[in-house]
Amino acid sequence: MSAGVGRLTAADRVVDQVLEASRSDGCVVIVEELSQAEVRFANNTVTTNGIRRDRGVSVIAFRETEGGTAVGTASSSGATDVIDVLRRAEANAATAQAAEDASPLITPGRSTAAGDFADPPVMTSLAGLGNVVTGLGDAFKSAGAAGTRLAGYTEHQVSTVYLGSSTGLRLRYVEPTGKLEVVARSDRGERSAWAGAGAEDLATVHVEELKQRLDRRLSWGKRKLDLEAGRYEVVLPPDAVADLMVPLGDATSGREAEEGRSVFSAPGGTTRVGESLSSQRFSLRSDPFAEGLECTPFLVAGASGQDVSVFDNGLALERTDWISDGRLRRLQYHRAGAKRSGVEPAAPADNLILELPGAASTLEELVERTERGLLLTCLWYIRDVDPETLLLTGLTRDGVYLVEHGEIVASVNNFRFNESPVDVLSKTIEAGRTERSLSREWNEWLNRTAMPPLRVAEFNMSSVSPAI
Amino acid sequence: MATVELDAEFLALPLEAVRSAVLERARALGCEHAEARIERIRSQVVSLRDGRLETSADNLELGLGLRVVHDGSFGFAATVELDVDAAAALADQAVATARATAPAVTERVELADEPSHGEAVWASSYDLDPSGVPMAEKVALLEDWSGRLLRSPGVDHATASVLAVVEDKHYADLSGTVTTQRRVRVHPDVEAIAVDSAEGGFETMRSLAPPAGRGWEYLLGEGWDWDDELARIPDHLAAKLHAPSVTPGAYDLVIDPTNLWLTIHESIGHATELDRAMGYEAAYAGTSFATFDKLGTLVYGSGIMNVTGDRTVEHGLATVAYDDEGVEAQNFELIRDGVLVGYQLDRRIARLMGFGRSNGCAFADSPGHTPIQRMANVSLRPAPGNGPTTEELISSVEDGFYVVGDKSWSIDMQRYNFQFTGQRFFRIEKGRLNGQVKDLAYQSRTTEFWGAMQAVGGEPTYHLGGAFNCGKGQPGQVAAVSHGCPSALFRGINVLNTRAESGR
């Protein structure tokens, strides 16, 4: 079976087969090979596990038509017939009208010189989880003896993407992603703590190190205090900052802003680009070449969306500062949208970095400088409440601690918050040094984040949650 | 049951050969249990913005997943290679995975018994396979809907989309159960947007039509009056744009089933999953306040509260004939007369906690994922006999709001504290509706909220809501689920103003 159901044909061959069989005026083929190993645990035992191989093929067919270019897309996952995927895409293109997001297809440039297109995909296995599984067995024993229950998840995946086009693009990129998350709960469930780490290579992540962080946090919880809802000064660790900044990054749609439908809209059909969002000189950016956070340096889109276009497949991604010097600088646009609006196109990469240039303080130093405030661990169940202000709601989770005179004095109850990440930037009193973080809430969609710890005034804890 | 129509293309796959190869190898490797799933999932998204096509995606997923219990440990492996040799190799991989993680397994896996059901076939209730409707026809229908909204005064922008999923699943296990099932579901959605371009600010109004276990006929008017809904949205939107901002405080709420289904999902559906209550979801989705020691005694709500779980309601999104552990679909009580009397179960949890049998709540969202405990259609029963209408419920409120349609939602990790908004909120004064307010959110705690439920509407107010995107587990899995409920009256619920919450 060449391209049909059954065994998989090599990815580079699939790209060539589809392009050769294409009857369209233009064609883009994306093959994404995924290899993943995972282990999940709770109550000091492994509960589920898995190893998995998947392959996704997306075909985009372009057809010149009256008034522009029409597009048809189709995709498959698994060992399906790739020529069938192509024909479905072509059938969809045959009846489509000229697309609003049309631009000339990307042609080979500097970034396309990769000579590795014929290389096979990179695979992971349970060995890709490093010593995590062994480490867990030991951690379960010591946790059980100490009256603590561990729950969590570890995963290692490698995505190898191949992108080819009728204009001669042949791009390949290998993106490994790993994570370990652990929750420790006291046996009777009255105390809990969370720690997480994201890394390309899980050999660099050690269960014992995370467990020490958890034990330290559980020890802070020995004195318990009930606090009421209200506006508090908070110290946000980098992971919690990531929980808030990922939705902010997602809200940078140029089209929504111009249509008056986002927090970055200004009256009269204009946007807030150029406006100061914070007196702190923050930089919020995505950068495929950021050290330790490297990710796919070209655009891959199986379908168009609000600010993403299938016409832009293969577009070289670069460092994009959405915010710099505390001012909003860029919004997301595909090339066609950018041309209409007279701006430069901008697309996010698979990472997000918040930095205050020059800031060097650690989380501990921010705590030391806090007269009275709450140290959080991470945030959870975050949802939009009002897109006009980017008001988000959610919960504090697995560790809220009262800081008085620079010291952690007790653990306190959880809260529901209602707060906007845009306001968090403007209410920041102090930011520390940016480091690799893992958003508890969003890491499945965006693993690669680097954030500073922040000290923020007047954070709105709307009500108390008795949940632990 | 009428003749079940399965898809000929799916049946033409080497289902029997592949499942036999994988199960025989699993048996030879000494597995206590093994279940194989060959699945094909066709999912299509068409989305228009201001009447122009913005997104179209048409995906076909095909693969094989195998879960084994080997020497007291689960092992799961999945592949996209559907041939006999690859299938046999997959069994070796699943057993290797079980062995590799066995050193960290401290609790031996055993499954509750389930009789063999032999060979069975089933298909959900639908007329038109949405994947067979040409793209141009889908786009044309959504263009028509968009046009009706955009031509209305006060509507500046409109979005229209439909998500359609057709799922063919062939399941076989070592006990001899072999099932082939087809589930079809669609989620049409339109939203109108009004922008105040002079002052800044905007409001939206979305359709209330729920996602449903139906085919393309749903978009043509079977089961929902689209003409009526499309005609009403612009007026509702205009009224909302000019509505006063709500004054926060404690109010009586009449909650329409188009909003209440989601509150049921979050505060009852997830809270009565026994894997959560026992701590097996502690790292991700969370645990539950409804702990096992409170079964039979926990007062969940007022005495008129009766909640069931089912896998059987027609057009339900979680409706099937057999789950992904080969367990037959059932109906069961969760809350009777306000008291917690049951949980949702899978086979491992059922055995562990001393239930004789699973009630059929194990599912995987794709061939590449392992089955986990997933939600049944969890529904609140209407008042028996001639229960009140929504108007009668409204007439019994002196000072409050009538909440219609779901929007923002969030609940804590033990399912106590929640906050919901909605599509529209009508002021109730002295038993009568008096225009809309905006910026309203209601916030409460689960048992306080359900304890404050003073009346449930009758059968005519009953509505089956639902979602395609219920998330659980790691790696994350999504599930579609429906929730039926009547309109209901709640006394003294905390209402917030979301502008004030943002400090404005």
Image (tube, coloured by chain):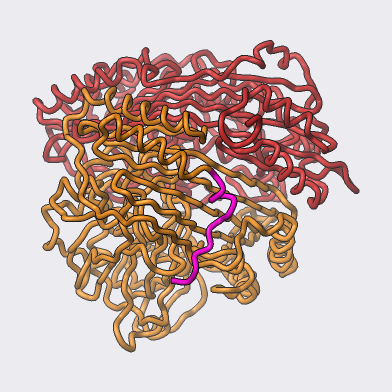
Chain colours: A red, B orange
Q: Is residue B416 visible?
A: no
Q: How far from the left and from the top, in percent, is residue A332?
A: 66, 35
Please state which of residues B467 and B393 is positioned toward the viewer in this rendering: B467
Write down the quadrant of residue A430 in the picture: top left
Front-most of residues A309 and A397: A309
Q: Residue at coordinates 30% horizontally, 27% vertically from top-left? A: A195
Q: How many marks?
A: 0
Which quadrant, please, contains the N terminus of chain A? top right
| Residue A284 in picture, x, y percent from top left | 55, 27
| Residue at the image position 59 percent from the left and 60 percent from the top | B189
The residue sitting at the bottom extreme is B386
B4 magenta-colored = yes
**Which segment is the magenta one?**
B1-13
* Image-quadrant location for residue B111: top left
Q: In this orientation, which residue lies closer to the viewer: B346 or A20?
A: A20
Q: Is residue B324 visible?
A: yes
Q: Quadrant of the C terminus of chain A?
A: top left
Left or right of residue B466, residue A340 in this image:
right
- Picture layout, residue A396 above or below residue B104: below
Give residue A93's position: percent from left, percent from top.
78, 46
Name the chief secondary structure element in magenta: loop
Quick check: B462 above or below A404?
below
Q: Up-down: is A216 above or below A240?
A: above
The residue lying toward the viewer, choosing from B253 and A111, is: A111
Q: Magenta stretch: residue A103 in it?
A: no
Residue sitting at the far right: A66
Tell me what residue is drawn at x 52 percent, y 29 percent: A279
Residue A145: x %, y % from top left? 9, 25
Residue at the spot 80% in from the left edge and 28% down from the top edge: A166
Quarter of image, res A363: top left
